[in-house]
Amino acid sequence: MAVIWMALISIVSAQPKQRLQFLQRFYDEPHRLFALYASAAREHGLVNWLDQQNYAHILDKPLHAGAFAVVALLWLQSLRAARRPRLRHNALVWAVLFTLVFAVFDEWQQSFTPGREMRASDLLADTLGVLAVAIGAQRGRRTPARAASATADGPVRTPRG
């Protein structure tokens, strides 16, 4: 599934900017609301800066983070089910590595597409999505000793120092 999701991302990334104009409607309403707010708060430096930016480049960051979080999650699930113990044992590391390499490739690929460009801010958003999955997977993971003692003795309590 990870490869299929990556292929979908690559197909969208390879589309010229003109073909992606249908996404504009998702930016129009937030832009209108922000313009109302910005006209009331012109003196604030951040508001002025945001008002001068291209909203499409700001509002697409959650989409980048979400898309690459899905890639990382799919890789993680696939690698945890791998037959090779080395892949299973280091599934999180491999999932993060595969996804970040793909994110760099995806941004590089966009530099060859008419009307599109490689953006460090997109790569940062991709990385934040991957890191969110990595942190969530690490926090959700319990060591066998802790899991066994939690079920046998109740919740694990750590002494306070």
Image (cartoon, rainbow, N blue to C red):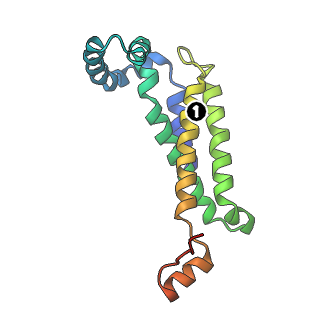
Note whether residue 22 is visible: yes
Q: Is residue 141 above or below residue 27?
A: below
Residue sitting at x 38%, y 14%: 51
Q: Is residue 5 above or below residue 26?
A: below
| Residue 160, position as x, y percentages in the image | 56, 71
Residue sitting at x 53%, y 48%: 132
Q: Name the quadrant containing residue 128.
A: top right
| Residue 52, position as x, y percentages in the image | 42, 11
Extreme residue in the right direction: 86
Note whether residue 4 is visible: no
- Say left or right for 39 vs 20: left
Q: Name the element at disc 1.
A: helix
- Say left or right for 30 vs 123: left
| Residue 18, position as x, y percentages in the image | 44, 16
Extreme residue in the front direction: 161
Front one among 88 and 150: 150
Residue to which mark 1 is pinned: 124
Quadrant position of the C terminus in the picture = bottom right
| Residue 44, position as x, y percentages in the image | 37, 15
Q: How many marks?
A: 1
Residue sitting at x 40%, y 19%: 55
- Give the amino acid at mark 1: Leu
Q: Is residue 58 above or below residue 39?
A: below
Q: Count neighbours of disc 1 (C-alpha within 10 A) and say few if under 14, some if 14 to 19, many if 20 or more.
A: some
Residue sitting at x 47%, y 18%: 17
